[in-house]
């Protein structure tokens, strides 16, 4: 008996490709199980190509392999090039147009956080359950899952007359700036669809993402009167820039840290008599002495939020705190937009119900909405205001973004079956 199919039989509630799926859905599921070895071979091939975001040729090479797979399934493909100034490889798009069901927009990414300069970890089976390799679950496993699901549907002629766009970005881990350029085509194409499904790492069989927090940046600059340290705190000299920065940061913590889904992290702080910060290199420098009152402080950080309303409310409160200066000091805070929030909507909840029914019909158990605070921001957030969204549909595993990242190969067939039947039901 095929090991993958044996694993499915052992899953809680799984009963031989559960009775509630239709005969044609059963054939789709069986195709995935029967071809799992070929699916794993494709995964190994793409994992063994370094495609760190800044390795432009590696990203393109992975894209070319996937492009061939999509074209074999009858999809039209395009490579979306980006201006040289962005220093990003570009994006792979595959699509077909029809009149059946909902228009789907399937999201993946070709790049990983592992740059070419880092020690390379090839695809390696650790045991019968786990394999390791750079980007094996985040998110080459999810990319390959999309292809395996579409192959199974194609084998039963179930892609005919459907409208499906697959968009694999080449810079999800570090998007080209400005995103108004690097995500313009992505957003424009998504607006032509009804539903977006993203195949970032699945946290478990029982959780999917109906919401993801957004991320933005901020930079705080404080100044103070400089002079001999013996004069600090007096009316003439005041408190200096470092005490003013400390006051502000601690007030941020006291005032806002208890709000659900809102976080704000000061990542770099530089303070002294001469201070500079380079955004491109994320490097701060400071010169000062213990007996001189600090003249300037620069702090950079991020702000994460569940909605635009929460973001704006937090920003306004932070501005109020910044304006309440200590004697002899000034302070200014600047905000920069990054990735918007994928807000929890009724439409997303309705989409989860469809996924949940597929899971129940396959005997895989109930699927609930995950905690938005447990995931970072992702590409799907750029289009969440335009279409219904669901994320976290990809491969399961552990240790994403770190050496030793793994994929659970025993769970992979069942998650792929779930992905295929979700696509099938949405496109009927």
Image (cartoon, rainbow, N blue to C red):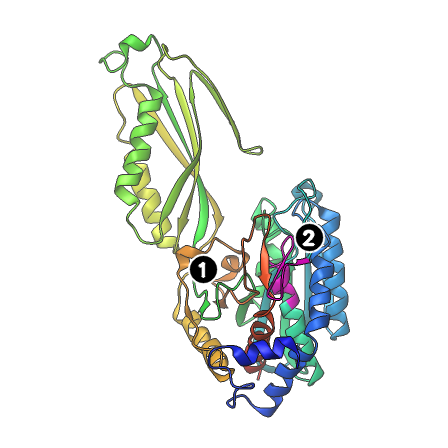
Image spot of residue 415 (x, y percent)? 56, 72
279 in magenta: no
Total label count? 2
Badge 2 element: loop
Q: Between 168 and 268, which is closer to the camera in this rendering?
A: 268
- Outermost residue toward the left? 235
Q: Which mark is residue 342?
A: 1
Q: Between 29 and 277, which is closer to the camera in this rendering?
A: 29
Vertically, is 192 above or below 310?
below
For marks 2 and 1, the one nearer the N-term is 2
Badge 1 element: loop
For the question of whether residue 322 can be seen, the reply is: no
What residue sits right under mark 2 in the picture?
Answer: 90
Q: Which quadrant: the N terminus?
A: bottom right
Q: Residues within 10 Å of mark 2 (few under 14, many from 20)?
A: many
Q: Residue at x 54, y 33 (%)?
A: 282
Image spot of residue 259 (x, y percent)? 29, 50
Range of the magenta residues? 124-144
For the question of whether residue 267 can be seen, the reply is: yes
Q: Which mark is residue 45?
A: none
């Amino acid at each position: 008996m095929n090991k993958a199919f044996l694993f499915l039989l052992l899953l809680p509630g799984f009963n031989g490709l559960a009775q509630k799926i239709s005969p044609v859905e059963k054939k789709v599921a069986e195709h995935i199980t029967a071809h799992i070895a070929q699916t794993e071979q494709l995964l190994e091939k793409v994992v063994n190509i370094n495609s760190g975001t800044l390795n432009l040729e590696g990203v393109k090479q992975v894209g070319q392999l996937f492009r061939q797979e999509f074209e074999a399934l009858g999809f039209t493909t395009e490579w979306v090039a980006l201006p040289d100034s962005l220093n990003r490889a570009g994006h792979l798009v595959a699509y077909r147009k029809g009149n059946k069901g909902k228009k789907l927009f399937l999201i993946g990414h070709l790049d990983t956080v592992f740059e070419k300069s880092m020690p390379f970890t090839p695809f390696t089976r650790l045991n019968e359950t786990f394999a390791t390799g750079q980007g094996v679950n985040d998110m080459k496993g999810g990319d390959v899952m999309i292809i395996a699901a579409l192959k199974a549907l194609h084998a039963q002629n179930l892609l005919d007359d459907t409208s499906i766009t697959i968009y694999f970005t080449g810079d999800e881990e570090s998007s080209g700036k400005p995103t108004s350029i690097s995500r313009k085509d992505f957003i424009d194409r998504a607006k032509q669809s009804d539903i977006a499904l993203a195949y970032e790492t699945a946290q478990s069989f029982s959780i999917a993402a109906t919401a993801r927090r957004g991320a933005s940046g901020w930079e705080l600059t404080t100044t103070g009167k400089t002079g001999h340290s013996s004069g600090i705190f007096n009316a003439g000299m005041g408190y200096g820039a470092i005490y003013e920065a400390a006051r502000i940061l601690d007030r941020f913590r006291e005032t806002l840290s208890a709000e659900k889904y809102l976080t704000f992290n000061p990542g770099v702080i530089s303070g002294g008599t001469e201070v500079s910060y380079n955004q491109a290199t994320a490097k701060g420098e400071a010169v000062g002495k213990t007996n001189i009152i600090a003249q300037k402080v620069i702090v950079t950080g991020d702000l994460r939020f569940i909605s635009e309303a929460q973001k704006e409310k937090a920003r306004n409160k932070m501005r109020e705190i910044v304006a309440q200066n200590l004697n002899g000091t000034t302070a200014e805070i600047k905000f920069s937009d990054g990735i918007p929030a994928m807000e929890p909507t009724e439409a997303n909840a309705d989409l989860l119900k469809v996924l949940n029914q597929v899971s129940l019909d396959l005997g895989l158990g109930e699927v609930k909405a995950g905690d938005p605070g447990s995931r970072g921001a992702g590409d799907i957030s750029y289009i969440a205001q335009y279409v219904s969204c669901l994320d976290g549909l990809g491969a399961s595993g552990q240790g994403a973004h770190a050496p030793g990242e793994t994929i659970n190969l025993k769970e992979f067939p069942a998650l792929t079956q779930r992905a295929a039947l979700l696509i099938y039901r949405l496109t009927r």
